[in-house]
């Protein structure tokens, strides 16, 4: 839970920051896409109308009178058929039309609508709703896209291109193409919405992730609290049972041997259970503290570890073990840390080295110093850890099979406690081991 708690603190600012960045990027991307899609749609329509205008021959247009007599004009019929075919092939275009200019007003020369259509404009019909932009094309001789504009036929995005007579450089007609404004807006909004949808989806994922992490934190806090309360309640009667069994054994002169054995068994099991509860309480306590609650000070590692080693003299003698300090751990190496927490942590590592060492072996403690980081290592010649079990030993409640066979009891919480303390000190811990040849545990801390 320690890693999760620190992660939650990290994500408490990380999630809102990322969400804010994603939101800003989403808004800017949406605005940028809107502008680009709008420009692309207008440019595409303008290129289309210009291409068609260049394909129409001016000499077919100059013969038109701009009245009903054109209906029998062969050039009108040719132009009419071309406009109708182009209209059919242009799926996004609703109207295509040729207009002339007289008496200050544009008028229709020909359009793409069949004569029986209610939208058909006969030759000579004045285009009364023509805008100043529309009229200006006859003078500027430049193609242009007129923004969204409404007339009697609807609301359109219109592209206009002049058709110029090469003989006199005069505008003989203006070709217009109308795209329905609804289709234009649908196209623009669909493409523009993509960045917003993606940004919204990413934000949703982050919100869900943050919610899940918060719930995990609450659940683990509840579990830790429950373990702590239960352990406290169990430890008191267990301590009493342990004292009673020790008292009974001191007065066991008249007891039968099988009774003594039973009491010894009760004593052994109660101590093992008491040790497990103490491990749970230690782990629960360290998971609740944060880095601000550590009482950090400068600790000279050589003298610090030498004092710890003195507490293990009896255990070392029982197994004929030697604990030596490698010359790499000099008196000048210090780390910044909470002395009480580090003492408990290194106690766990030295105790494990003794517990799983073979009789007559050597335990070595040394140090590597690099880039303002001190790596203290504890090496034994014990049973080692199988390769498949090494990734799990710091998870808690896990012991390898050879460890279970070598030493009865144990919860596997000691190494998890070690990892939690190291992480609170902005360090890291890892292990290198080979089965039946021993293990080396490395603890990296800031100097």
Image (tube, helix red, strand yellow):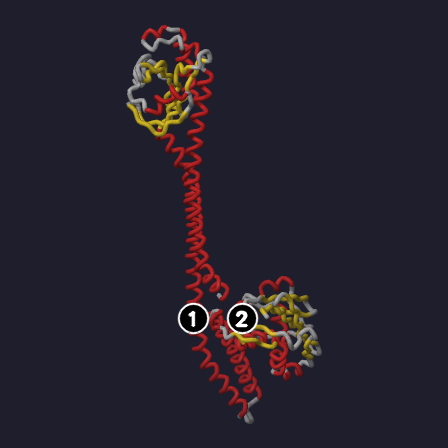
Q: Secondary structure at mark 1?
A: helix
Q: Quadrant of residue 262?
A: bottom right
Q: Nearer the viewer, mark 2 or mark 1?
A: 2
Per the image, label 2 sits on a secondary structure element best described as helix
Image quarter of the C terminus: bottom right
Name the mark on residue 421.
2
Q: Quadrant of residue 59?
A: top left
Which residue bears the numbered disc 1?
Answer: 225
User: Disc 2 or 1, which lies upstream in sequence?
Assistant: 1
Measuring from the top left, give residue 302's x and y in whole percent.
63, 77
Q: Which percent across, then down, holds residue 32?
A: 43, 40
Pinpoint residue 60: horizontal percent, then vertical percent.
42, 10
Q: Mark 1, residues whose alpha carbon is within 10 Å: few (<14), some, or many (≥20)?
A: some
Q: Is residue 396 something one can see in this rendering?
A: no
Which residue is pictured at 51% across the width and 80% down the height?
270
Q: Position of residue 307 (x, y in %)?
A: 61, 82
Q: Residue at x 39, y 36 (%)?
A: 189
Mark 2 crowd level (few <14, some 14–19, many ≥20, 10 Å Cα) = many
The vertical placement of 398 against 41, above or below, is below
Q: Which of the two residues, 214 or 367, is positioned nearer the viewer here?
A: 367
Q: Which is more toward the observer, 353 or 157?
A: 157
* Separation of residues labelled 2 and 1 (CA atoms): 19 Å
- Tell whether 49 sits left or right of 361: left
Q: Say above or below: 69 vs 86.
A: above
In this rendered view, identify the residue nearer to me: 412 or 248.
412
Q: As drawn, is 364 to the left or to the right of 285?
A: right
Asked which quadrant contains residue 195, the reply is: top left
Residue 386 in the figure: left or right of residue 162: right
- Against 376, residue 47 (above or below) is above
């Amino acid at each position: 839970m320690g890693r999760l708690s620190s992660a939650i603190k990290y994500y408490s600012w990380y999630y809102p920051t990322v969400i804010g960045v994603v939101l800003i990027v989403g808004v800017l991307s949406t605005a940028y896409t809107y502008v680009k899609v709008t420009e692309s749609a207008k440019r595409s329509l303008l290129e289309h109308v210009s291409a068609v205008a260049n394909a129409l021959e001016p000499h077919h247009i100059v013969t038109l009178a701009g009245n009903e007599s054109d209906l029998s004009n062969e050039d009108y019929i040719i132009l009419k058929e071309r406009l109708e075919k182009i209209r059919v092939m242009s799926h996004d275009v609703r109207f295509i039309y040729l207009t002339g200019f007289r008496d200050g007003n544009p008028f229709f020369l020909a359009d793409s609508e069949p004569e029986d259509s209610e939208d058909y404009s006969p030759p000579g019909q004045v285009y009364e709703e023509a805008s100043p932009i529309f009229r200006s094309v006859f003078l500027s001789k430049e193609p242009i896209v007129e923004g969204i504009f409404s007339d009697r036929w609807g609301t359109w995005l219109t592209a206009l291109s002049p058709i110029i007579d090469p003989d006199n450089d005069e505008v003989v007609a203006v070709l217009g193409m109308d795209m329905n404004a609804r289709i234009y807006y649908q196209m623009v909004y669909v493409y523009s919405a993509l960045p917003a949808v993606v940004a919204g989806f990413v934000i949703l994922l982050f919100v869900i992730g943050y919610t899940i992490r918060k719930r995990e934190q609450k659940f683990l806090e509840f579990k830790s609290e429950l373990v702590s309360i239960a352990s406290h309640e169990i430890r008191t009667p267990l301590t009493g049972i342990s004292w009673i069994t020790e008292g009974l054994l001191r007065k066991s002169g008249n007891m039968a041997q099988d009774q003594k054995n039973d009491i010894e068994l009760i004593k052994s099991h109660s101590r093992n259970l008491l040790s497990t509860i103490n491990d749970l309480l230690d782990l629960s306590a360290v998971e609740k503290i944060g880095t601000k609650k550590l009482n950090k000070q400068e600790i000279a590692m050589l003298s610090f570890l030498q004092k710890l080693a003195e507490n293990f003299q009896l255990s070392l003698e029982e197994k004929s073990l030697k604990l030596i300090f490698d010359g790499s751990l000099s008196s000048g190496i210090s780390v910044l840390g909470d002395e009480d927490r580090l003492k408990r942590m290194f106690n766990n590592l030295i105790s494990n080295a003794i517990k799983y060492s073979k009789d007559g072996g050597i335990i070595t403690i040394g140090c590597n110093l690099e880039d303002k980081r001190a790596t203290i290592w504890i090496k034994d010649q014990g049973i080692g850890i199988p390769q498949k079990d090494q990734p799990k030993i710091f998870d808690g409640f896990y012991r390898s099979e050879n460890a279970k066979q070598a030493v009865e009891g144990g919860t596997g919480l000691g190494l998890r406690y070690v990892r939690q303390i190291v992480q609170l000190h902005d360090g890291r811990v890892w292990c290198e081991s080979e089965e039946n040849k021993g293990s080396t545990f490395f603890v990296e801390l800031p100097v």
